[in-house]
């Protein structure tokens, strides 16, 4: 089976790296002779994933203004209200690879949470026009994210793998027959343990991840997180390890975490992890933390999968669904409207600290089942062959 992953923005988002890295490994582990290729918008960032059989340039192409293709696209769009020709030109690097594979995996995870995605809809249409299998791999989609156009696109898929039960239930309610429940593949990802930095307290370090994405969606959230860090420093003896997980220009965790570090480094109990580590290296640090508080989903998955008690600064259905599948409830997940309330953040932190033993025990009993659910995705994929 030849498989091409697409809808991947590059591995400077270490969550995207985690999806590609872990998916490639479990597919090859369970499907004999499988070949896995990646179409990436930033292929140079994916060289850190050695298990791939090929990395393609899947970046978008420009249509030169006033060229013949530009004029054809403009006329088709204006007269027929049809943008498929233009989108086909823009996504031609990915579309040109469809003929070489058997199955195309749309892998973004939460790509369908951010409005309409006409470029990917067009790729999906071209996949099916060429008679290839089309799979939405490990997705999360909220009820609020759905539209008629998106639903019509989802109907094209031969298989939709929802990574948590809230998305699964919503898609089933929409009448989609091709939906199966699994777990995020990153629960199975390996980790690499680098030397611990100066100031790290073994067994007594709390990781904190915060993102510009959350800050943009709730402008008061940064101040609330800052007050939470002050509370931790003032009321505990723990070291705080500020942990970036996405390092794109314009959406860079490291930049906002650096501002916290510069303010608090005088305490001697604040560490800033570097901005150049891979997903497995960040997971190696997160695995050795006592607690973790994070906004980036795959940073929290790294913590959950190592049975580290975790508090989630959530902003979509994925955070709630993943927590629900682990704990049976949306435990220690704060919604986007709540994370500007420092009292709520502190209250949830105190709850996590007071229930530390119970949470670790629950994670140890549940995470093996969640990892098995990650592998279920490959079982469903293999049945398409």
Image (tube, rainbow, N blue to C red):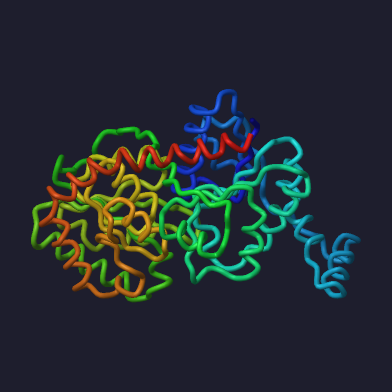
Decide which of 199, 125 is in the foreground and name it.
125
Q: Is residue 284 left or right of residue 96?
A: left
The outermost residue toward the top is: 33
Q: Going 72% across and 48% down the picture, which residue do you hit?
A: 127
Q: Quarter holding the C terminus?
A: top right
**The one of 134 and 15 positioned closer to us in this rendering:** 134
Given residues 228 and 379, the one toward you in this image is 379
Q: Position of residue 79 (x, y in %)?
A: 87, 74
Which quadrant: the N terminus?
Answer: top right
Q: Nearer the viewer, residue 177 or 225?
A: 177
Residue closest to the far right: 68
**Residue depicted at 49% across the width and 47% down the height:** 16
The residue sitting at 17% across, 44% down in the picture is 361
Residue at (58% x, 36% y) in the render: 383
In the image, residue 173 sits, relative to residue 162, either above or below, namely below
Percent position of residue 107, x then y:
55, 48
In the displayed structure, 193 sits above or below 273; it is above
């Amino acid at each position: 089976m030849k498989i091409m992953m697409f809808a991947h923005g590059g591995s400077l988002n270490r969550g995207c790296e985690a999806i590609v890295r872990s998916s490639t490994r479990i597919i090859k582990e369970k499907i004999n002779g499988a070949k896995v290729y990646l179409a990436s918008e930033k292929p140079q960032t994916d060289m850190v994933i050695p298990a791939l059989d090929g990395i393609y340039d899947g970046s978008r192409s420009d249509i030169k203004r006033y060229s013949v293709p530009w004029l054809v696209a403009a006329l088709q769009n204006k007269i027929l209200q049809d943008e498929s020709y233009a989108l086909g030109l823009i996504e031609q690097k990915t579309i040109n690879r469809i003929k070489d594979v058997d199955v195309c995996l749309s892998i973004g995870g939460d790509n369908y949470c951010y409005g309409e995605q006409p470029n990917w809809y067009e790729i999906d249409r071209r996949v099916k026009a060429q008679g290839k299998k089309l799979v939405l791999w490990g997705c999360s989609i909220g009820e609020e994210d759905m539209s008629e156009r998106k639903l019509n696109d989802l109907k094209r898929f031969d298989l939709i793998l929802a990574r948590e039960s809230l998305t699964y239930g919503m898609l089933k309610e929409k009448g989609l027959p091709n939906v199966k429940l699994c777990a995020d593949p990153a629960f199975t990802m390996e980790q690499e343990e680098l030397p611990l930095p100066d100031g790290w307290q073994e067994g007594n370090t709390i990781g904190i991840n915060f993102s510009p994405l959350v800050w943009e969606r709730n402008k008061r959230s940064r101040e609330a997180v800052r007050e939470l860090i002050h509370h931790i420093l003032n009321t505990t003896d723990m070291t705080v390890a500020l942990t970036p997980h996405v390092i794109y220009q314009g959406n860079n965790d490291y930049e906002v975490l650096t501002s916290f570090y510069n303010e608090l480094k005088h305490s001697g109990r604040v560490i800033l992890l570097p901005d150049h580590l891979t997903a497995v290296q960040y997971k190696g640090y997160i695995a050795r933390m006592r607690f973790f508080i994070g906004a980036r989903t795959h940073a929290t998955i790294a913590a959950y999968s190592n049975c580290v008690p975790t508090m989630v600064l959530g902003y979509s259905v994925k955070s709630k669904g993943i927590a629900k599948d682990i704990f049976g409830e949306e435990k220690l997940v704060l919604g986007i409207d709540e994370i500007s309330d420092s009292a709520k953040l502190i209250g949830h932190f105190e709850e996590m600290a007071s229930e530390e033993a119970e949470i670790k025990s629950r994670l140890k009993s549940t995470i093996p089942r969640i990892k098995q659910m990650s592998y279920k995705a490959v079982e469903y994929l293999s049945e398409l062959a």
